[in-house]
Image (tube, rainbow, N blue to C red):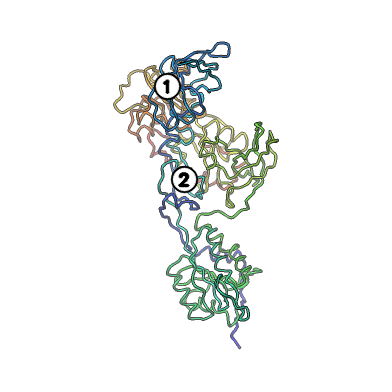
Amino acid sequence: MTDRKEMRDLVSLDRARTVLGDLAVGGGTERVALQEASGRVLAERVDADLDVPGFDRASVDGYAVRAGDVAGAGEASPVTLEVAGGVEAGERPDVGVGAGEAVEIATGAVIPAGATAVVMVEDTTERDDAVEIRRAVPPGGNVMAAGADVAAGDRALGAGVRLTPRTVGLLAALGREAVEVRRRPRVAVVATGAELVQPGDDLDPERGQIYDVNTEAIATGVAEAGGEAVRYTRVPDDREAMADAVTRAAEECDLILTAGSTSASGADLLYRVVDDVGDLLVHGVALKPGKPTIIGRVDGTAYVGLPGYPASALSVFRLLVAPRLRRAAGVETERSMTATGRLAVDERFDEGRRRALPVGLVEDGAGETVVYPVDKGSGATTTLAAADGVVDMPADTRRLAAGSEVTVELFSPDAQPPALLAVGESDPALVRLLDGVDRNRFLPDGSRAGQRSLRDGIADVGVLAGADADGEIVADWRREWGVVLPPDADADGEPLSLLAAPDRTVATVNHDLGLRAAVDDAAAEAGLDPASLGGIETAGIESPARRVADGRADVGVGLRATAERLDLAFLPVGTQRVAVVANDDRLSKPGVGQLRAQAADLGQIVAALPGYER
């Protein structure tokens, strides 16, 4: 008759989770090549150090022109321009656009020098060596400015993002060949029992043999939870063999998982083995199935003994082990492949085609899921990088009403709302502030977008530069801005007048950014017409300065902090307040609370940035 030990002190599942949670199961970081990064968890913030696209490009087929040359064009009053040449996508323009000239251009091609807009081919008629223009276009019309997709200096991805084909594509667009990721916990998977046979080998049912289900099932679960499974040869029900197996696994792995031989019968030996070679912390959990579960340490390495029945083993793995592995690997809790939520804004589409609308998810103050569109166009890498899934709009659906419940087809089972969603103005102090907030998402779409997002109940916090909004101010600071020039540039006179100089190539920011409002207001106060401050409008807060730094512009708008970092001359004009404003509905969210706590260190962040003050 074999010995038997009753499991008298069963612990609750919560207690078992606490015990396992106190044990180290791996961690740290490692650098991997981009081709190996899919599925890994980013361990660093990735800032864009170049514009995507890296050049001003045509968004339609047509003719590159000077917008002023076609200002009066119309169906009844066409303008005829001489065609100076053509440019295709992927080639360097060998022709410029002079006064009264046009250059034929393909979608995606580089805008030739001198051109400020593109006229769609549908609005033109060829006339020998000339082209007749029947529609006026404004400056920048049908031009995708460099940095319109991803602007240099903006945060592209935050730490904690699980890399997918979409986000790996974004890293590739930024030229990254390697990236720092969370190291996967190495998990030993050891099945026990003389009756087990490797799948593919011959099975003798008369001897009570069964195929080893647990090794592959558990190893697959380990991989899905973000770990690296290390499979060991099955171990017979022998005390010495089991001790050798778990001791060897302890030397090579961060966590040991065994399946089988965990009960209290005399034939089940693992609780005795763990008691002999390590520390037996738990033997028995008040769980059905899963009662004979073991938790302990072997030579300092975390150990979990799962029940032998596959259903019980996988149940305990899912409830107890997988959450701990996911936390160690930085991977979020598993979810289904669909989610339902309330649409934040009206979404219309009347082209008569079926549409997969990219959307993001965020939770409101009551914990309900809010669904918001994130579509920046089919050519934008960031559209999918910022999305959690898609909402299907059939061909006969022209409108999805705000407030309606929609089903989201998730890109991955672990897609879920971020702990904090911030929308608004990009700013060097802001991205450093967000570094201390777990699992945050930031959409750097400008102050106007921040205001709209707060109004529509999308953002947890809006980042507003020079703009007011209702809500609690979580953090605020002032930043100095002005005109940036090459280091050796001759800069006499009123700084803002340099932005209106006809003999200079000027780079400014678009009207979505709060910085542009400061520029226009300062120009009006200086007696200048804001409309006279020409130049290419960019989407990135640092983009104009970077154009000056690499010679694409003679003068630009920028922050002192950016100018000093890029070794540019800086002519100060004014300061602007940046405020992080919380949605009144989200004040109790943990992510907002964590951001508020991080704001206590704002003084140190501001002190490290030239031209910044609280």
For residue 200, side relative to residue 102 (left or right): right
Q: Residue furthest front?
A: 128
Numbered tag placed on residue 435 in the rendering: 2
Outermost residue on the top side: it is 77
* Residue type indicated by callout 1: Gly
Q: Is residue 57 above or below residue 274?
A: above
Residue bearing the label numbered 1: 85
Q: Percent x, y for residue 350?
A: 66, 31
**x and y, in percent, of residue 270 in the image:** 54, 77
Assign the C terminus to one quadrant of the image.
Answer: top left
Dividing the picture into quadrants, the one containing residue 365 is top right
Residue in front for this viewpoint, 5 or 383 = 383
Task: Give the label, 2 or 1, closer to the camera.
Answer: 1
Percent x, y for residue 2? 59, 86
Res 466 visible: no
SS assignment at label 2: loop
Q: Secondary structure at mark 1?
A: strand
| Percent of width and height locating residue 572 | 38, 26
Q: How many labels, in total? A: 2
Depth check, front residue: 142 or 602: 142
**Farthest residue toward the bottom?**
1
Residue at 55% x, 11% y: name it: 77
153 displayed left or right of 204: left
Q: Residue furthest left?
A: 488
